[in-house]
């Protein structure tokens, strides 16, 4: 491993949606309902991309997803800006972490690395925070 690329994409993390089928003029077509969001995500990542996709190198990816805290994590009235002591830090609700990972890996495939078969390790986590974001670190 000789290189490292790290970047942050601000905004609520997105999950990969299941591919859908539709019939147009009697022909069955497949489409990716996440393609527009993946394009937007990739646009925010392009300033950090390597000159050429990483090729012939094993890749390890570390991803941290941070979701905006719901109002129920805060007090009421004069304590509306104060976080409750029982408010969790770890995000254990939907979306599933595997779908979040798939979204990021699909969006970056072919731009950051040649083929996602090069990825040998993925470490991912989901948390709550004040600012929603996705932190990505690619080690190769």
Image (spheres, helix red, strand yellow):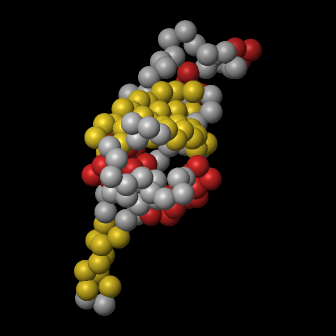
From the top left corner, tell me how far across and down residue 55 is, in percent.
37, 54
Q: Is residue 68 left or right of residue 30?
A: right
- As rendered, which of 127 and 39 lies closer to the eye? 39
- As rendered, which of 10 and 74 lies closer to the eye? 10
Q: Which corner quadrant holds the N terminus?
A: top left
Check the image and report above or below for 82 versus 4.
above
**Residue at the limit of the structure toward the top, as seen here:** 85
From the top left corner, tell me how far across and down residue 48 is, in percent.
58, 49
Check the image and report above or below for 113 versus 63.
below
Check the image and report above or below for 108 versus 69.
below
Q: Which corner quadrant holds the C terminus?
A: top left
Residue at image location 62% in from the left, 53% down from the top = 47
- As rendered, which of 55 and 88 lies closer to the eye? 55
Q: Is residue 134 visible?
A: no
From the top left corner, tell me how far across and down residue 45 is, in percent.
56, 51
**Residue at the limit of the structure toward the front, as seen here:** 2
Residue at image location 25% in from the left, 80% down from the top = 28
Quadrant in the picture for residue 106: bottom left
Q: Is residue 47 visible?
A: yes
Residue at image location 44% in from the left, 37% down from the top = 2
**Residue at the limit of the structure toward the bottom, as seen here:** 25
Q: Is residue 117 left or right of residue 36?
A: left
């Amino acid at each position: 491993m000789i290189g490292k690329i790290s970047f942050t994409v601000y905004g609520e993390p997105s999950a990969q949606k299941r591919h859908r089928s539709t019939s147009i003029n009697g022909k069955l077509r497949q489409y990716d309902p996440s393609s527009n969001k993946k394009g937007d995500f990739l646009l925010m990542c392009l300033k950090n991309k390597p000159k050429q996709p990483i090729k012939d190198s094993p890749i390890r990816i570390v991803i941290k997803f941070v979701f905006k805290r719901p109002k129920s994590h805060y007090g009421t009235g004069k304590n509306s800006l104060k976080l409750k002591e029982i408010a969790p830090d770890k995000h254990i609700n939907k979306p599933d972490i595997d779908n979040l990972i798939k979204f990021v890996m699909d969006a970056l495939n072919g731009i950051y690395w040649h083929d996602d078969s090069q990825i040998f390790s993925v470490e991912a986590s989901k948390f709550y925070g004040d600012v929603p974001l996705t932190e990505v670190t690619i080690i190769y």
